[in-house]
Every structure is written in C-alpha cells, then in structure tokens.
Image: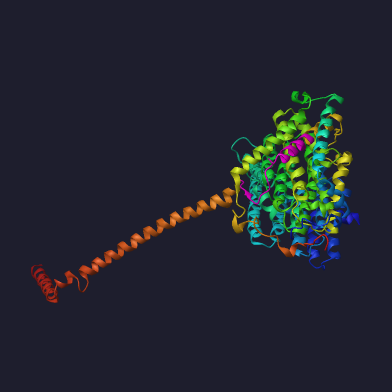
Amino acid sequence: MLDLLHQIPTAFLFFAAAGLIVFLPHGITRNIVMLGTPIVAGAQIWTMGMGNFAQMPFFGFELELMRIDNLSRIFVLIFCLAAFLGNLFAWHLRDTTQQVAALAYAGSAIGAALAGDMITLFFYWEGTAIASVFLIWARGTEGSFYTGMRYLIIQIGSGVILIAGVALFYADTGTIAFDKMTLGEDMSMGSLATWLIFLSFGMKCAFPLLHNWLQDSYPAATITGTVILSAFTTKLAVYALARGFAGTEILIYIGTIMALFPIFFAEIENDLRRVLAYSLNNQLGFMVVGVGIGTEMALNGTASHAFAHILYKALLFMSVGAVMYRTGTSKASELGGLYRTMPKTAIFCLVGAASISAFPLFSGFITKSLTLSAVAHEHYTWIWLALVFASAGVLSHSGIKIPFFTFFAHDSGKRPAEAPTHMLLAMGITAFLCIFIGVFPNTLYSILPYTVDYQPYTMEHIAGQLQLLFFALLAFAVIYRAGLHPPEVRAVNLDTDVTYRKILPSALAYLAFVVIAIFKGLTGFINTSILRFVDRLHHSHGPDGSRAASWPSGAMVLSIAALLGLALFVIFFS
Amino acid sequence: MANKPKDNPEDYPTLGRWMNWVDQPGNDRKIFWALVVVCLACFGLEWTYDKHPYFDIESVKGFYAYYGFVMFAGLIFVATCLRMVIKVREDFYGNKSIDTEEYPEDQIERIEHDA
C-alpha cells in the first residue's frame, strides 16, 4: 500500500481529492476526504526518505516532481499540517468552491516546494495563484471581487516574471535545475535571469514596496479562506529564496526593512485581520534575514521560524475568524470584552499571541532566537538591534493589540456564544502544538535542514527575552493608563498601494480628460472651419451667390462661341 | 447584537466568570503593580548569571529592559504620528474595497451566548 502511495507525487493526491469531493455529498464524507488528504500526504513524505522521485519528460526537458531533502521536507510537512488544521477549522463549510480551492491551493504549494526544476516550480507557482484567489472571491461581495482581481494580477505577474527569468536562465546556462543561484552584478543575460527570478520570489514574499497585495487581500478573503491563505504563498516564497538565494547579502537588508516597517502600520490599523497581515509581513522579515545570512544556523532559523510561524499565525487568524463568525466583524473599534462569553477562544488567542511574541515555553521563542543568534554570530550589530526592536514590535501588535482589543479593553457589549466545536478543536490542536514545540524544542530541531547545535533555554537568553517583553508590556501599560495609546477608530490607513489604487487611476483619468478635451477641440475646430469654408463657397458660388448673379447663361454661350472660333482659327493656320 | 451592559455575569461560561476577575473594580491596578513587580524581578535576574555577549551593548546591566521599554514607547509615538499623516476615511477606496462592506450574513452564524 505504501509502495503504491510512494508512486504518486504528493501534489497529485491533493488534486485528486479536489476532483473527488465535487462528487461527494456535503457533510462528513466530504470532510473526511478534506482532512484525510493532508494526513495521507504527510505520512507519504515522512515515510519516503530522501531523494528525487517522479521524473517526467516535458518538451525535451526532464521535470523533477518530487525532490525530497531536508529543506523541502520540513516545508511540505508544515504545509500538510496547515492544510489539515485549516480544513478542520472550515468543517462547517458547505461551499464546494472554497473546498476545492483549499485542496488545490495546498497541493500546488506542496508541489512547488517539492519541485526539483524551475518549470515545475512555475506551474505550481501559478497554481497557488489561481487556486487561492477563489478563497477571496468566495466572500461573494463587490469589494472582494475587485480585491481578488488585484491579487490575481500581482500573483500571476509574479509567475510571468518567473518564467521569463527561467527562460533566460536556461538560455544562459542550459539548465532548468532549481538550485542555488547567484545574483549577477553585470548587465549580462544570466544576470537579468537571476534578478527576474529573485524579483518573482520577492513579489510572493511581500518584499517592501511589493507587499501591498498581502494586506489588501487577506482581510478580504472568507473567514476560513484567510486561515488557509496565511499558511502557503508567502512561506513558499521563503522556501524558494532559501533554496535559490541563501547567503545573498541584500536579503539581510530587505528582511530587516520587512521586519521593521509593518509594525508601525499594524499598530494603527483597525481591521484585526489586516493587523495580522502586517504582522505576517513582519515575521517574513525575520525569515528573509535568515536566508540572507545563509549559514546553517540561520537557515535552520528560517525553516524553524516558518514552521512555528505557520502554526501561531493560523491560530491568531482562527481566533479572530471565530470572533468574526460570531459577531460579523473583525474591526477593533467594534470589538472588546469578548472574553466573557468566548473565553476558550480568548485563551487560544493568548497562546498564539505569546507564541508570536516569543515568550519562553512558546514556539516563537525557540525559533526566532535561532535567527537572532545567527545574526549576532555574524556580527551584524545594527541588523541585530533592529530585529530585537522588531521583536518588541511583534509584542505590540500581535501580542497585545489582537487579544487585548478583541477580548479585553473596553466592553463592546457584544455577548456572542463561544466558537463552534470544530473551530475550538482546530484552535486547541494548534495551541497545543505551539506550546509543545516551545517546551520540547528538539522535536522541531530534529527535522530542520541542518544539525542543530543550539540551546535556547539558557538563563541569559531567558532573562534577556523576559526583560525585553515585560518592560515592553510595562511601556504599553503606562501609555494605555495615561490615555496616550492611539485609539481604535474606523478608518483606513494609506500604504504604498494608494499609488496603483488611487493616484495612478486618478492620474490616468486626468490624462484621459486632457487628451479628450484636446481631441474634441481640434476636431471641433476642423469641422467648423470646413463648414464655414463650404458656407462661404456656397454664399459666393451657389445659385444665389454673387458670382452666379454676375454670370448670366448668355455669357456661357458667348464663351463657347469664342472657344469654337479660336479652334477654327488654329485649324485654319495649322 | 444590542449592547447589554447590565447583563448578568452569572450567565457567562465558567471560564468567562473566572476571567471576569480582571474587570472587577481595582483589579486593573493590581495587574499593573503585579507587572511592575515582575519587571523588577526580571531586572534582578541580571545579577544571577554570567553574560556571554556578542555585542558590547549587551553587557550593560538591564540592556534588554531599557531597550524594550524605550523602543516600545518610541514605536507607539511614531505610529501615532504616522496615523496623522496616513489616516483617511473608511470609504476612501469606495466599492473596490471591503473596508466598508458588511461580512455576508449567510456565511456567519451569529448566536448570543444565552440563546
């Protein structure tokens, strides 16, 4: 049975399940397939061992569909786990579109992570884009339709840039293998190829200025869709960067900016799912820095952080989603005091908050510290200081803001019932895993790409982290009690997407107005000039014109007689 | 869901009733002072172990405490200033955004806790 299972590429398991559920009735049968698929896929990867499996010829190329090594395996395993937890959270769904999209999306992400060549990567890369947009459109509103279109343009654009880069890369090197590349520093074709591939990965990874699709689209997806979305696309991009560009120094600086700027936006954002999207962007920054450092310790930090992050971020999205499911809103200005009647959801949210804030005994602590230690080890002082600051910033928006303004703070007067059982179960399992990884770090360390020689629980490390977090909490408490904390108000904050959502369309509309005005003016002028000319001609040469009046018909007879006389005269003398 | 500020806490789930302690009069002060004590205790830990710093600045006693407090306060201040510059009304992007949309009622299940 296992041998048979090992013959099938993991992604195909998901695609087969996505095709199968369409014919199954809603309810328990379909849900068993939804939950069973990631379990079977995870078991398959776990038992297959390392190596390249499933080659396929394709227009003269040899595609590698199943490259399992230490780096791809951990990403595939966490993708399977995320798909299971997301589908459990969505147990109540009776929407075939979303269910098919969720399976196809997870399958595409897993297929991409297992791709041994860049053509396979491209197909799955686009697969994630196309499948995931249905999780946004499934909301079924006008706003979600437009948001989905923006999302799709950027995601498909990333794939188009990728295949352009791959084509140039093949022309330059003669290979399509997806391995470590070097960013070129000259103007050659090979250099352009790697930069295009890098840009493509950067778009999906939400690099600064390429990030807006993330904060735009994730809050627009359905409640369950956002949980699924949060796991795959961006972490696939992190994996792709780790595979292709480990040790690329520019990533250290890009990652640091990514870790820093979202914390300011998250602090003042009202929509809590958008706060989490900014927070996600900030967490990606840590991972990108790890890739940029590129040492074994740093790459372990990136992989472990991605693993832990998928869990606690999903947990936070689930808890806010559960609140939304019961109240219809995720706006901080409309929420508050919900711990009274949703205490279990509140506790799960606090576990997610503690994990992302990297409190000792929670998952974030044992993963983020790997990256920070790797940065310190390489003596990047300013980068290290910036990342420690960003860690305090994480506490601010995800550690405090999300649980505090949802479940505590002022009483909104809302008294919703506790989340449904399946949501509590999904959150409970995720919360358990966050704590389990934090308490037993070696379980995660044992599946990292490289051997881990690191002890997170030293007195120095624990004391330093506790000081950082508790004094940051104290700063919050002082500021909040003093009434200086920015209040939660119904508003939107502009980000750089205002350029393509507002300024550019306005500029185009203005340009169109000017061009139309000039065109109308010119054609009007020409038309009136011609009409006036014809009028004048008519006036002078028309039947009633002055020229017509001074030339009687007798004059024409006379001129013909003169003409004939002239002809006679010429003939006579010729 | 109408505001019900005078509802009966006895109707809350057990866990909710326990957690309601945080909203009892005076308890917010207790929590604050407990946090101060915890902070002081964490600061005191500095004298209980030997440091092996990567950077000189880590050798400063209580570096993480100062850094955490000051940078967090700075973050709030800068974010507050940033809001003055970038805040716009909720319907700024009009119907091309979900900002002012209600979440579709057929996709959620509003239930009161005492229903």
Choose between B104 and B16: the one closer to the eye.
Answer: B16
Q: Locate residue A247, reporting x and y percent.
A: 72, 35
Choose between B3 and A533: the one closer to the eye.
Answer: B3
Determine whether, in the image, residue A481 is placed left or right of residue B85: right
Q: Residue A356 falls in which quadrant of the image? A: top right
Quarter holding the C terminus of chain A? bottom left
Q: Locate residue A470, reporting x and y percent.
A: 79, 36
Could you tell me which residue is drawn at 37 percent across and 60 percent down?
A523
Could you tell me which residue is drawn at 77 percent across and 43 percent down?
A399
Q: Locate residue A155, reporting x and y percent.
A: 66, 52
Tell how many labels: 0
Choose between A227 and A523: the one closer to the eye.
Answer: A227
Could you tell me which residue is drawn at 67 percent across and 45 percent down?
A268
Quarter holding the N terminus of chain A? bottom right
Q: Is residue A472 within the magenta segment?
A: yes
Reply above or below: B105 against A58.
below
Query: Which residue range is magenta in the image?
Result: A470-495
Q: Residue B46 falls in which quadrant of the image? A: top right
Determine whether, in the image, residue A145 is placed left or right of residue A16: left
Q: Is residue B29 within the magenta segment?
A: no
Q: Locate residue A29, reporting x and y percent.
A: 86, 65
Instruction: Kindly tell me whether residue A72 is visible in this rendering.
Output: no
Instruction: Kindly tell me whether residue A537 is visible in this rendering.
Output: yes
Determine whether, in the image, residue A510 is placed left or right of residue A423: left
Could you tell me which residue is drawn at 28 percent across and 64 percent down?
A532
